[in-house]
Amino acid sequence: MAYFDNAKVGDSVYGLVFGAGEIAQIFEDSHYKLMVSFKNGYEVPYTDDGIPGWGNFNKQTLFFKNDVDLTDVDFAPVSKVLSPKKIIKLREKNKLQVRLPSGIWKNAKKAEPSYVEELLEKEKFHLFRKKQDKDKAKKDKEKEKSSKE
């Protein structure tokens, strides 16, 4: 049984790439079972397991909105804007992260190449950062949490 077997048109969903959206269409006899319209204007087809029809994703990125827990997802703002030269170096070493339209940081290799190229062409360097060490990211989250209290 697939995750979206009981999905209906109009159900609220959350995509890790594009954020909040709703199911616009359901296709019975197709590889992509769902068409999701996101609040930022994107429409993306998904399999009944929540895998998108674009990018290099092989894991589920779409969930019912009530099933999503974003407490462990990195939405942190960029602390240092990278130079174009540094972005190229990090990209070659597979240590470059890009901020997806949902606000989540992901490896640039996982993002759609045209999306990354468009950001580079438009000189939106603030949407790139060096891959975070897991220990450093954890410390930053704890620091941010303690400063709010």
Image: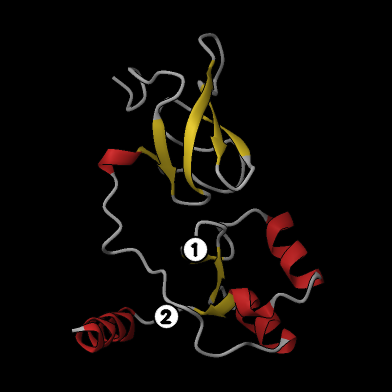
Which residue extends farthest right? 121
Percent across and percent down for residue 108 are 58, 65
Q: Is residue 109 left or right of residue 65?
A: right
Q: Amino acid at mark 1?
A: Gly
- Tell which of 57 and 64 is nearer to you: 64
Are there few (<14), some (14-19), or many (20+) residues within 10 Å of tag 1? some
Residue 140 in which image quadrant: bottom left
Q: Which mark is residue 132?
A: 2
Where residue 109 sits: x, y (%)?
A: 58, 62
Residue beneath the point at 77% across and 76% down: 123
Left or right of residue 103, residue 11 in this image = left
Where is 105 relative to 15, above or below? below
Q: Nearer the viewer, residue 144 or 57?
A: 144
- The residue tagged 1 is 103
Image point (55%, 67%), residue name: 99
Q: At 52% across and 66% down in the image, what residue appears?
A: 107
Residue at left offset 37%, top offset 82%: 133
- Residue 25 falls left or right of residue 62: right
Whole-percent x, y for residue 142 in the image: 22, 83
